[in-house]
Amino acid sequence: MKTTPTEQALRLGSKVVYQIYIKSFQDTTGNGMGDLRGITTRLDYLADLGVDYLWITPFFPSPQNDNGYDVSDYCAIEPIYGTMEDFDELSREARARGIGLMLDMVFNHTSTEHEWFKKALSGDPKYLAYYKFVDAEPGATPANPGKPPTNWESKFGGNAWEYVPSLNKWYLHLFDVTQADLNWDNPEVRKELSEVLRFWRGKGVNAFRFDVVNLISKPAVLEDDYEGDGRRFYSDGPHIHEYLQELVRLGDIDGLMTVGEMSSTSLESCIGYSNPANHELSMVFNFHHLKVDYPGGEKWALAEPDIVGLRNLFGTWQERMTAGGGWNALFWSNHDQPRPNSRFCDTDHYWYESSTMLGLCTHLMRGTPYIYQGEELGQTITDYTSIDQYRDVESLNYYRILQERGYTPEEAFAIVHARSRDDGRTPMAWDASEHAGFTHGTPWLRLVGNYPTINAAAEMEDPHSVRSFFKRLIGIRKAEEVIQRGDVRFLDVPSDKVIAYERTLGDTRVVVQCNFSGDEQPALATEGSEVLVSNYEDESAGVLRPWEGTARIWR
Ligand code: TEU
């Protein structure tokens, strides 16, 4: 079946996805970690918000070294998160409310606790061929294993290869040492993974998110990278489109709602992944816009965000993905990113304006918006004061690595504080009671101290809250075809702190203007229009006020 670009927009452009980081969403057992039943108890809250799909981060058996992104069995439930019956109940109850579940498939790697890896470690050739094992250098011994196969760096710090003395081989791990990369060049691996999709399909699952899926196709020749950390060799790798098409075909998921997480990707590749004619994925996450505050591309250093760069990235991706028939996932936030209101705006002085302007900025673009739990409440980054309050493996590694690079403990802490993945992973703030209604036990990760005011219960009652604003944004997407499928064009603006774009469909035109500063900025003329949505109550011609986000419509 051929899908035309308009059908694509009709199918995807009216949907909104809500991301649940299960460990931090709602605990029902008192173990301090969220669980599947916790999600079920909060379905009415999510239905009220108006979202269509819940992307739930991995809840499969896992040693939890990377909070579930180290999967040891793809077709079962991790006991801390519940049982298969809990999953079935959640699935049923969600469907009864018109909400679909989007499962998170971590197919680039497995946990080293997975059966397949254990069999590989025992020397079974079938399973050795499931992973990226490479013989040690000639003459290598366990006491002196020599150099790793390449100088590639793990995304969590250190070399990406681990030596196994009993085998005299190295295996590749682009992430933690307990996350071994699968060998997608092996057709049996590809078949196994498509069976996983069929298993969950059989349980009625109709949406999937694929973790770092553009890293699955490694180059045939392994070589050192003298220009970078190795990513240019394996990102959007040689057989990536072929493998994705096969996975979609064998897993029988063509036409379902799917999104691929694309690490250090290119626009051309993303058109390929998401153009319906290719039968790969519905849409893509790319992260270029979330690096505008990385000086020289370095995550572990601090800088002010480059708003002109941000505008150019949004503009290029919006316009060129549209022209190429691709489709964008729209997002600021997920479980790997610090909360964007704290990161890009000023939550000390303009918390409401900051949190709502960001939402308005992406929700009216062309694509499918994603809301990360707590974003709709304006939750902020942590107020942690000490490294032992952090849990994330990457944060703890880099706290050490930064000091090895010569930073003082205080400097290293300041960087981790601003950059940690735990900044977005603190428990969901449900109400003002102890532990914010998240757990009766001890939360696995400390809550942010502002939850007595920033929480769901308080914001549900207030028609002017951040949550009410997000609910309105979702309502506008549902109501306005111009937002669902209109064309998009970025506009020239007389300020380097403003991002503006227009959406058009027939005679309808929407102009969105966002002020990324705490100062007044000049606004574009908008005669003859009316306000579609704004984070300021009254109108003010000619200027954008601090952190103002306003959309105006001509009908
Ligand atoms: O993330 C992939 C990824 O590239 C980023 O998380 C990156 O590692 C991070 O920003 C480093 O600065 C996905 C998942 O979202 C993440 O939670 C997992 O840890 C990772 O894959 C491995 O599965």
Image (cartoon, rainbow, N blue to C red):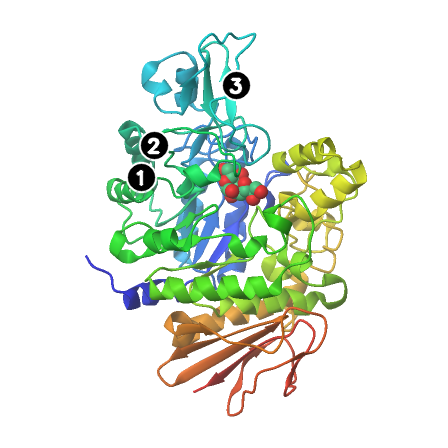
To which quarter of the image does residue 400 belong?
top right
To which quarter of the image does residue 534 belong?
bottom right
| Residue type highlighted by circle 2 | Trp
Whether residue 48 is visible? no
User: Mark 2 vs mark 3: which is more N-terminal?
Assistant: 3
Q: Nearer the viewer, mark 2 or mark 3?
A: 3
Evaluate if marks 2 and 1 touch, with contact meaning CB atoms under 8 Å apart: yes
User: Mark 2 vs mark 1: which is more N-terminal?
Assistant: 2
Of the pair 395 and 77, the residue shown nearer to us: 395
The secondary element bearing badge 3 is classed as: loop
Q: CA distance from mark 2 to mark 3?
A: 24 Å
Q: Residue at x 41, y 67 (%)?
A: 319
Q: Is residue 319 above or below residue 101?
A: below
Q: Nearer the viewer, mark 3 or mark 1?
A: 3
Please state, as top left, top right, bottom left or bottom right, where the C terminus lies in the image: bottom left
Residue denoted by label 3: 147
The secondary element bearing badge 1 is classed as: loop
Q: Residue furthest bottom?
A: 528
Of the pair 532 and 272, the residue shown nearer to us: 272
Specify few, some or many for label 3: CA neighbours under 10 Å numbering under 14, 14-19, or 20 or more.
few
Residue denoted by label 1: 239
Q: Residue at x 61, y 64 (%)?
A: 307
Q: Is residue 451 above or below residue 395?
A: below
Whether residue 344 is visible? yes
Residue 274 screen position, x and y as percent: 34, 55
Please give the label number shown on residue 453: none
Q: Residue at x 54, y 32 (%)?
A: 153
Q: Nearer the viewer, mark 2 or mark 1?
A: 1
Q: Residue furthest left?
A: 1
Residue denoted by label 2: 184
The image shows a total of numbered marks equal to 3
